[in-house]
Image: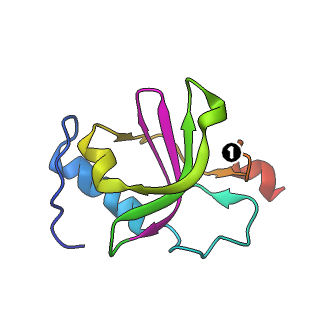
């Protein structure tokens, strides 16, 4: 990956690089559109918001995922987010979040539960 030109009020340049390295491993846009239960590539969070990224487009650095509003769940929805903008306002990556999937309603499951 080339140089990253985004700054975070909370993260070091190295930590921002780790986020983009993980995102590069995510499926590209529309690769999971016919899949009802999608693997979560990255979990980002800030305040009362959590973004579960399931697809990523490197060229414009946009992610597709489920943005969960912890304060008001009725405002949670699937959509596109600029990763640069999220990092600039203070979103961080959950380093301990792995092997999880999300359904179309935004429910998170352990991946092993579905592999059985």
Residue 39 painted magenta: no
Q: Going 40% across and 60% down the picture, which residue do you hit?
A: 22
The region drawn magenta spans 42-57
| Residue nearest the observer in this picture, 102 or 82 | 82
SS at badge 1: loop
Question: Which corner quadrant of the image does residue 32 belong to?
Answer: bottom right
Extreme residue toward the front, this view: 75
| Residue nearest the observer in this picture, 5 or 24 | 5
Residue 52 painted magenta: yes
Give the overall secondary structure of the magenta segment.
strand
60 displayed left or right of 104? left
107 displayed left or right of 82? right
Coloration of the structure image: rainbow
- Up/down of 89 relative to 1, above or below: above
Question: Which corner quadrant of the image does residue 34 belong to?
Answer: bottom right
Query: How far from the left and from the top, in percent, is residue 13?
Result: 16, 50
């Amino acid at each position: 990956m080339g140089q990253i030109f985004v700054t975070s009020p909370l993260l070091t340049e190295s930590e921002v690089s780790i986020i983009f390295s993980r995102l590069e491993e995510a499926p590209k846009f529309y690769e999971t559109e016919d899949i009802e239960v999608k693997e979560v590539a990255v979990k980002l969070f800030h305040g009362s918001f959590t973004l579960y990224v399931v697809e990523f487009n490197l060229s414009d650095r946009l992610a597709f995922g489920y943005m969960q509003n912890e304060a008001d769940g009725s405002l949670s929805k699937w959509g596109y987010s600029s990763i640069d903008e999220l990092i600039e306002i203070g979103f961080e990556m959950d380093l301990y979040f792995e092997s999880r999937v999300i359904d179309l309603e935004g429910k998170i499951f352990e991946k092993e539960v579905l592999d059985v």
